[in-house]
Image: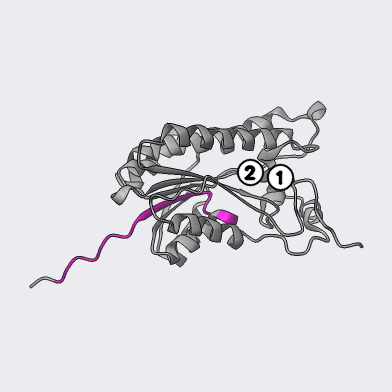
């Protein structure tokens, strides 16, 4: 008599999985029993994460349609969870000095990239067993409103939020949950990328702030919404450090 087949693990796709929130999310989901496809542009770093968690590597640039189609093909016909995490901010110039190339890149990554991946994987998500398909958009409290120097990034994240709201309405009669996770201040490479590798400037963002969120804090929120029954949808979860009650208000220790 043959032994019963081991049930296949549910498949999760995480974009931007090579570092920060994406890497922490890949680890969290793997610990919860998901077979994780780690997608990002940096192959070497992806392989480190995938080897660590027993996941899969898919080099993917979310701004490139062919690259996204290759991701969808690698993921296969049934995906239970998509985490749209790829994105980021570039620069902190006021509107009068705006670098529109940076703005274009931010819209391409945060908005069009998330839309492109979601469109490609929606058929697989709808085919998830037991109607458990779920797509999570990692936005930001920057979507709540503008701040000085943040017009490009705030606008991109607000557009990504609008996408989640529209899609949730469009999918109400089909088995796909649409979730937004909106983090506040998280200490990752976010600011280092924003300031083009200027470590000193990036460090000043977090200077004097105690209890800044970690990537693992946000990943635990994504893991939580992923663990809920198929009939439960978390429309939006805002997660901030206790010392940041609003995007513009942060408690800093006196120097």
Q: Is residue 11 magenta-colored?
A: yes
Residue 104 on the magenta segment: no
Whether pointer 1 and pointer 2 mark residues with C-beta atoms closer than 8 Å, the reply is yes
Q: Quadrant of the N terminus?
A: bottom left
Is any atom of residue 19 visible in this view?
Answer: no
Q: Which residues are magenta?
A: 3-21
**The disc label shown at residue 130, or none:** none
In the rendered structure, find residue 88 and report the number of the disc placed on it.
Answer: 2
Residue at x-position 70% and y-position 33%:
152
**Which quadrant, please, contains the C terminus?**
bottom right
Q: Determine the secondary structure under disc 1.
A: helix
Q: Residue 202 location in percent, x, y? A: 76, 52
* Residue 81 rendering spot, x and y as whole percentages: 41, 50
Location of residue 207 (image quadrant): bottom right
The residue carrying mark 1 is 194
How far, Cα to Cα, is label 1 from label 2? 7 Å
From the viewer's perspective, tell me whether residue 88 is left or right of residue 124.
right
Vertical arrangement, residue 43 with respect to residue 177, above or below: below
Element under disc 2:
loop
Q: Residue at x 39, y 49 (%)?
A: 231
Magenta span: predominant SS is: loop
Pick the residue in front: 137 or 66: 137
> Which mark sits nearer the N-terminus, 1 or 2?
2
How many other residues sit within 10 Å of disc 1, few (<14), some (14-19) or many (≥20)?
Answer: some
* Residue nearest the viewer, comparing 188 with 174: 174
Q: Is residue 111 left or right of residue 102?
A: left
């Amino acid at each position: 008599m043959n032994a019963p087949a081991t049930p296949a693990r549910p498949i999760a796709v995480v974009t931007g999985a090579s570092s920060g929130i994406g890497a922490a999310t890949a680890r969290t989901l793997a610990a919860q029993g998901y077979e994780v496809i780690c997608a990002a542009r940096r192959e070497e770093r992806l392989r480190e994460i995938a080897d660590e968690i027993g996941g899969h590597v898919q080099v993917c640039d979310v701004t490139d349609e062919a690259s996204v189609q290759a991701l969808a093909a690698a993921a296969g016909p049934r995906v239970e969870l998509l985490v749209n995490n790829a994105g980021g901010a570039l620069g902190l110039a006021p509107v009068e000095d705006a670098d529109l190339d940076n703005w274009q890149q931010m819209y391409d990554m945060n908005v069009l990239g998330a839309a492109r991946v979601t469109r490609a994987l929606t058929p697989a998500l709808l085919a998830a067993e037991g109607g458990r398909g779920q797509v999570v958009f990692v936005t930001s409290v920057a979507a709540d409103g503008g701040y000085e120097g943040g017009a490009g990034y705030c606008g991109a994240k607000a557009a990504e939020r609008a996408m989640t709201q529209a899609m949730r309405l469009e999918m109400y009669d089909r088995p796909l949950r649409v979730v937004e996770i909106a983090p506040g201040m998280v200490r990752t490479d976010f600011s280092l990328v924003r300031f083009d590798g200027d470590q000193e400037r990036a460090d000043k963002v977090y200077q004097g702030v105690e209890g800044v969120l970690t990537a693992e804090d946000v990943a635990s929120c994504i893991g939580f919404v992923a663990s809920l029954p198929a009939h439960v949808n978390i429309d939006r979860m805002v997660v901030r450090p206790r010392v940041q009650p609003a995007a513009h208000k942060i408690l800093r220790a006196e120097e």
